[in-house]
Each structure stands twice: as structure tokens, then as C-alpha cells.
Image (cartoon, rainbow, N blue to C red):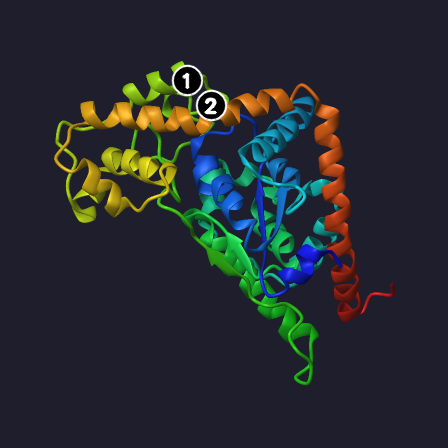
């Protein structure tokens, strides 16, 4: 057992991010920045979830490149792979094996309630893949394979943690007796920070996304200082000064989004940020947001470009993380198989 494991036996987090390329500010503030802060206090396992990525069509060579890019972004943002585990999901086969067992525990009715499938499948639901429909089961396997106690997520992922808890509870009821302790603990969602759901710079009612046709809708982690500046300058706003209370701010989606971004980048509450800017116009606020965004993101972008020059070194980091992940995953899956009744 590593020192890190022995120090953090009480808490363990698992979180994943898809290797879809073009990581943006929403990915950083909603996930990666929080991971960096958590790794010093909780035993942390982070995965580039490429099995989730193929629930929609992917170009194979681009998927490999995106995996390297996401790994570089995570490391450049401050994840210390001596403290945390970082690996790509498909390299640990136990994820897929546990997901199949959970497929035989999960109920169709539970999956039918998953709102993200309805959003992603859209009107073409009959042509959606089984993988897209069942990926919340794989997400539950990702979490429970490491006996995770906490899962840092955005607001839109909370429903998936509830499903993981349902699957864990159902598994416990099916395969452990009254005399035995439950095999799986029920993981708790951790929703952290002021910008848990970063919205588009062009429409404050839509989530920031790489799939948006307009590149001006998002700040990419690879953007130059000039690109960051131009995008924030052109970000949609309204003609009113910034308010002095959260309730009024929430009624103004673009203003709320930009203030949330500022407060998260500056590591302060939204209330405190409002004290600084209440009564001020966007002509005063935007230059300060630009300076802060460039100050925060430019070093990450530079380090990413440096790391991506040596992709074989990224592969070594991921391989090392894979071995550490397997040390935890293999005995957990072996115990699960014994409980189910498989001959190991």
C-alpha cells in the first residue's frame, strides 16, 4: 500500500473527463481546477474516459491525439501524478467487466429517466447506440470499481451519481447477506466552486461546449492571450450595471455567467465578487476579467504545448497511472466476481 493510500483511507475520489479535444474554460473550471485543489486532501483517481467517448462516432487517429491533449491539459493545470493517479480508462479492462455485471443489476426504468440520453439522442433516438443509452452504467462502474467515497461533478452529472448509488445499493441487496457489511459504500457527489456549469459566451442559457459551431462561444485552453481577450470583449452582455445581490444577478444569464467565471478564476465567492463590481458597467468589468483569464490560462496553454512535443512521455505517465489503477481495480473486481458466483 502506498503512503498516499494509507493517509487517505477514509476518502477517495474518482472523476473522469472525455478525450474530445478542444478543452475549454468550462472543462477547466467545472472539473480540472477542482481536481487540482482536491488532490492534496483526498486520495484522487482521475481518468481520461475514452470508453465513454466512443458512445458517439470518433475518428480513431483523432481519439488518440485528443487523449494526449487532455492528459497534457490535466498535467499542465497542476495535477501531480506523484500524488494522484492519471490513466486512460480503456487500459484498465476491469471498467468494462464491472459495467457488464452492473448492466445485469441496473433496471431499464432507471436508465429511461436519464435526461442526458434524451438530450444527446435528440429526435433520432432509435438510431442512438446501446453504448450511449447505457453509458451511465459504465460511469457507475468507473466510480465503484475504486470504492470511491466522493465524486466531484457538475450540476448536470448529479443524476448519474444517484444512479451509481442505486446500482450500488441494489448490488449490495442482491449479493451480500444480512450478516455481512455492504460491499459498496454509496458515493457522495461533490459540487464545488462558483462555476459548476459554465455557459456559452454568446448565449448565457446554453452550456459552453466544443460542439457549438461558433468558436467565439467558448475560451479554449489552447487559445492565445489575444484570442481570449477578443472573445471576452465580444461576449454577450446586457446594458445594465452589475447588481449588488445574487437574486438579481440570476435573472441576467450572461452577467451571471461572466461573474461566475470571474469569481471562480479568482478563488472567491460570487457574493464577494459582486461587492467589487456592483454598480459598475461591463466596460469596467470585462478588462479585469480578461487580465485574470489570461493570467490563469496562458501558463497552462504554454505548458500544454511543451508537453505535447513529447507524447511518448505522456504515454509513460498514463502507463504508470494504469498500473496504479489496476492495483486497486483488480482485487475489487475479483471480490465482485466471487460475490456474483463466478469461478475465478
For this rendering, which residue is in front, 286 or 198?
Answer: 286
Q: Are marks 1 and 2 in contact (CB under 8 Å)?
A: yes
Q: Relative to residue 148, is residue 95 drawn left or right?
A: right
* Residue at the spot 24% in from the left edge and 47% down from the top edge: 271
From this view, report whether residue 266 is shown above or below residue 97. above
Residue at the spot of label 2 = 298
**From the image, which quarter does the N terminus lie in?**
bottom right
Q: Please tell me whether mark 2 sits on a helix, a strand or a loop.
A: helix
**From the image, which quarter does the C terminus lie in?**
bottom right
Q: Residues within 10 Å of mark 2 (few under 14, many from 20)?
A: some
Q: Residue furthest right?
A: 344
For this rendering, which residue is in front, 39 or 234?
Answer: 39
Residue 36 percent location from the top left of the image? 53, 43
Q: Relative to residue 225, is residue 336 drawn left or right?
A: right
How far is mark 1 from mark 2, CA to CA? 7 Å
Residue 215 percent location from the top left of the image? 41, 20
> From this viewpoint, is residue 218 visible?
no
| Residue 225, disc | 1
> From this viewpoint, is residue 233 visible?
yes
From this view, report whether residue 319 is shown above or below residue 297. below
* Residue at the spot 63% in from the left edge and 67% down from the top edge: 184
For this rendering, which residue is in front, 49 or 118?
Answer: 49
From this view, report whether residue 116 is shown above or below residue 226. below
Residue 240 percent location from the top left of the image? 12, 31
Mark closest to the chain's N terminus, 1 or 2: 1
Amino acid at each position: 500500500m502506498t503512503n498516499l493510500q494509507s493517509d487517505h483511507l477514509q476518502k477517495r475520489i474518482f472523476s473522469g473527463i472525455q478525450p474530445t479535444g478542444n478543452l475549454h474554460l468550462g472543462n477547466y473550471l467545472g472539473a480540472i481546477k477542482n481536481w487540482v485543489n482536491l488532490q492534496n486532501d483526498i486520495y484522487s483517481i482521475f481518468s481520461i474516459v475514452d470508453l465513454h467517448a466512443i458512445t458517439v462516432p470518433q475518428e480513431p487517429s483523432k481519439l488518440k491525439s485528443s487523449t494526449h491533449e487532455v492528459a497534457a491539459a490535466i498535467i499542465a493545470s497542476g495535477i501531480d501524478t506523484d500524488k494522484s493517479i492519471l490513466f486512460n480508462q480503456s487500459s484498465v479492462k476491469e471498467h468494462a467487466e464491472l459495467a457488464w455485471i452492473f448492466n445485469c443489476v441496473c433496471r431499464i426504468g432507471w436508465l429511461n429517466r436519464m435526461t442526458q440520453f434524451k438530450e444527446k439522442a435528440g429526435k433520432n433516438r432509435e438510431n442512438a447506440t446501446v453504448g450511449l443509452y447505457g453509458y451511465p452504467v459504465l460511469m457507475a462502474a468507473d466510480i465503484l470499481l475504486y470504492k470511491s467515497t466522493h465524486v466531484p461533478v457538475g450540476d448536470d452529472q448529479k443524476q448519474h451519481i444517484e444512479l451509481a448509488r442505486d446500482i450500488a445499493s441494489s448490488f449490495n441487496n442482491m449479493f451480500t447477506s444480512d450478516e455481512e457489511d455492504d460491499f459498496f459504500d454509496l458515493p457522495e457527489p461533490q459540487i464545488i466552486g462558483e462555476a459548476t456549469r459554465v455557459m456559452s459566451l454568446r448565449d448565457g442559457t446554453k452550456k459552453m461546449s466544443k460542439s457549438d459551431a461558433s468558436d467565439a462561444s467558448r475560451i479554449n485552453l489552447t487559445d492565445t492571450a489575444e484570442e481570449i481577450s477578443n472573445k471576452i470583449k465580444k461576449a454577450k452582455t446586457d446594458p445594465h450595471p452589475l447588481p449588488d445581490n445574487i437574486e438579481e444577478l440570476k435573472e441576467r444569464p450572461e452577467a451571471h455567467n461572466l461573474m461566475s467565471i470571474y469569481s471562480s478564476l479568482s478563488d472567491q465567492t460570487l457574493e464577494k465578487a459582486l461587492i467589487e463590481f456592483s454598480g459598475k458597467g461591463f466596460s469596467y468589468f470585462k478588462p479585469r476579467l480578461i487580465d485574470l483569464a489570461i493570467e490563469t490560462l496562458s501558463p497552462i496553454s504554454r505548458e500544454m504545448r511543451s508537453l505535447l512535443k513529447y507524447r511518448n512521455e505522456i504515454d509513460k505517465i498514463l502507463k504508470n497511472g494504469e498500473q496504479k489503477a489496476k492495483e486497486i481495480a483488480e482485487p475489487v473486481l475479483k471480490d465482485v466476481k466471487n460475490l456474483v458466483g463466478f469461478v475465478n
